[in-house]
């Protein structure tokens, strides 16, 4: 065996070891690819029913929005009718009610200004003030 044969043998053994060392990560990488493929298949299998459910939900939501739109238009019509009724009542009853209020105020003012009414009012106010002062004095003595 010559030096060239030994060098060739060493190179062949080194090449086999290198291939063996590189084969381990390649086998592991193949396992990762298999796992990734199965995960993508699972995601796609679950996505199709999910998209079907989303479509159903959107369809149901649109139907409910149509109903809400109908309710909103009915409420708007009712609001318009109530506004018109309020304006009609204000126009019909507003003037007479103001006149009755003014008349009743005038009557009360006229009755309040009759002779002796002011004096009776002042006496009643003074009597109330005296009673309040007496109660306050009793409280101070009790404390």
Image: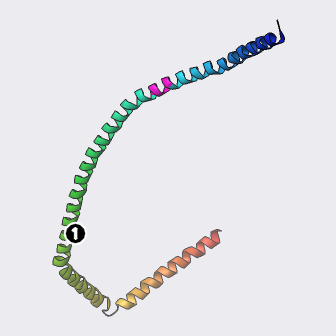
Colouring scheme, one of rainbow, by chain, secondary structure, one colour: rainbow
Task: Give the magenta part as a residue range.
Answer: 37-42
Location of mark 1 (residue): 83
Quarter of the rendering containing residue 78: bottom left
53 horizontally vs 22: left or right: left
Quarter of the rendering containing residue 83: bottom left
Q: Is residue 59 above or below residue 44?
A: below
Query: x, y (%) of residue 35?
Result: 53, 22
95 vs 40, nearest the viewer? 40
50 vs 115, nearest the viewer? 50
61 horizontally vs 136: left or right: left
109 vs 73, nearest the viewer? 73
Q: Residue at x 50, y 77 (%)?
A: 131
Q: Residue at x 66, y 18 (%)?
A: 24
Is-magenta flag for residue 40? yes
Quarter of the rendering containing residue 111: bottom left
Q: Is residue 123 above or below residue 55?
A: below
Q: Residue at x 17, y 74 (%)?
A: 88
Query: How many badges with numbers are in the image?
Result: 1
Q: Is residue 60 above or below residue 23?
A: below
103 horizontally vs 15: left or right: left
In terms of secondary structure, where does tag 1 sit? helix
Is-magenta flag for residue 47? no
Query: x, y (%) of residue 94?
Result: 20, 79
Q: Residue at x 42, y 83 (%)?
A: 124
Q: Residue furthest top?
A: 1
SS majority, magenta: helix
Q: Is residue 75 above or below residue 36?
A: below
91 vs 134, nearest the viewer? 91
* Image quadrant in which the N terminus is located: top right
């Amino acid at each position: 065996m010559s030096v060239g044969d030994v060098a060739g043998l060493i190179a062949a053994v080194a090449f086999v070891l290198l291939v063996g060392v590189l084969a381990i990560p390649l086998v592991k990488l193949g396992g990762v690819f298999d796992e990734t493929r199965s995960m993508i298949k699972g995601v796609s299998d679950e996505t199709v029913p999910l998209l079907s459910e989303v479509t159903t939900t959107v369809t149901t939501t649109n139907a409910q929005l149509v109903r809400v739109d109908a309710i909103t238009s009915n409420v708007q019509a009712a609001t318009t009718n109530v506004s018109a009724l309020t304006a009609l009542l204000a126009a019909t009853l507003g003037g007479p009610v103001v006149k009755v209020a003014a008349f009743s105020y005038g009557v009360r003012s006229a009755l309040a200004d009759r002779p002796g009414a002011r004096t009776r009012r002042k006496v009643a106010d003074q009597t109330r003030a005296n009673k309040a002062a007496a109660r306050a004095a009793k409280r101070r003595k009790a404390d």
